[in-house]
Amino acid sequence: MDYKQGAYKVRDLGLADSGRRDIAWAESRMPVLMRLREHYAESKPFEGYRITGCLHVTKETAVLVETFAACGADVAWSGCNPLSTNDEVAAALAQAGIEIYAWHGQSVEDFYWSIDRTLDTPPHLTLDDGADLIFRVHNAFPELADHIVGGSEETTTGVHRLRAMAADGKLLYPVYAVNDAETKWDFDNVYGTGQSTLDGILRASSILIAGKNFVVAGYGHCGRGVAMRAKGLGANVIVTEVRPTLALKATLEGCRVMTMDEAAAVGDVFVTATGMKDVIRGRHFASMKEGALVCNTGHYDVELNLEELVELSEKTSRVRADNREYLLKNGRTIYVLADGRLVNLAAAEGHPSEVMDMSFANQFNAHLKLVQTHQRGERLENTVIDLPEALDQEIASVKLETMGISIDKLTDEQTAYATDYSAGT
């Protein structure tokens, strides 16, 4: 494994050429982010700032990393999941001079070692997907917080935890909730997760989706996207939920809704998308059909209680890439994809470049706002902050423009009418 102290640790630098081709492909599909790179490459607003990131090392992430670097930032990076790093892309970034510590198949010790190396030089800005970097700063290196201007968080689970930390008065610096931007959650989470999760399932199993009872645990934005794509491939979609409103929405959108105890006995394919632990546990595995396929598309690998599955099993073996067979003591077999990690990133390539274009444009703009605030000598409150709604509309407008799509605009009279409370019937 290639390792140069203080610079990078990746699987194999010889993979860099392949990774560079992947990055070039992503660039061709991410026009909004590339436009931001072109616009700010000369003025270099991030010059003098170190951005430390902990986010899936994919070809799309590489476009964001290199956009920051092109705009003046000193960048250090690690992956936010032990199984989500694309080794070719990591090698390409290392070869290009980016400080990066990431490789596919890390142990838990490797994972935190990599994060710690990105913190050897104190950052000014942090960028997270799941908040592991932020938690590491708070729990192991709290003295760094005084040096940090602010950060950003990419995913739902991370934002929820950071809001809880802020409510408890424990958050040490401001963090933008990039996940909560409409051009992120209503596109990346729905269409990105939906497509990439099905992609991961098909790569790991090659099963026919049509006709299967397809159980989706959680009908939030990610779960809704998975259900939508499974239904489009001909599956009979079953949803399990704990929120009455989401269960009602799933019902009115054509899904069957039941408890996991009920679904476990009839499902053929199970996908968890809740952000909660122990969604599928021993009693559910014990009642599943012969050959049931189980996976997770939530950020952390706690949604499937695999320890309880092991207790029910006589033996386990890997039957194909990212696909592990468990032979239960009751004689049935269950297949777990990607060892319960994010199936869309561990078994596939993550979200398509086109949808990550908007998510990462939000990331760029969040950090630009942090730098501009810092340069004005201001300090934001130590809380979780939403990006302005106007920025969402601007990103969506640019995306439409790059797609060759035009939309209407309100006239002055219509704008006035929209706020004219004196107008009646």
Image (tube, rainbow, N blue to C red):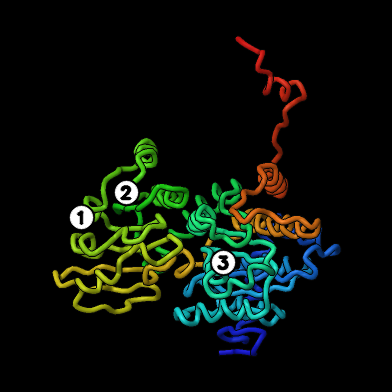
Residue sticking out furthest to the top: 425
Residue at 85% from the left image edge and 64% from the top image edge = 42
Vertical arrangement, residue 407 with respect to residue 142, above or below: above
What amino acid is found at the position of numbered circle 2 in the picture?
A: Thr
Neighbour class for label 2 at 10 Å: few (<14), some, many (≥20)?
Answer: many
Amino acid type indicated by mark 3? Ile
Tag 2, which secondary structure? strand
Residue 351's disc number: none
Q: CA distance from mark 3 to mark 2?
A: 31 Å
Q: For mark 2, what is the residue?
A: 240
Q: Nearer the viewer, mark 3 or mark 1?
A: 3
Q: Is residue 68 above or below residue 410?
A: below
Name the residue located 55 percent from the left edge and 53 percent from the top edge.
Answer: 188
Label 3 – label 1 distance at C-alpha: 40 Å
Q: Earlier in the sequence, mark 1 or mark 2?
A: 2
Q: Earlier in the sequence, mark 3 or mark 1?
A: 3
Residue 67, position in %: x, y?
72, 66
C-alpha separation, residue under disc 1 versus residue under disc 2:
13 Å
Q: Residues within 10 Å of mark 1 (few under 14, many from 20)?
A: some
Left or right of 403: which side holds 291? Answer: left
In terms of secondary structure, where does tag 1 sit? helix
What residue is shown with label 3?
134
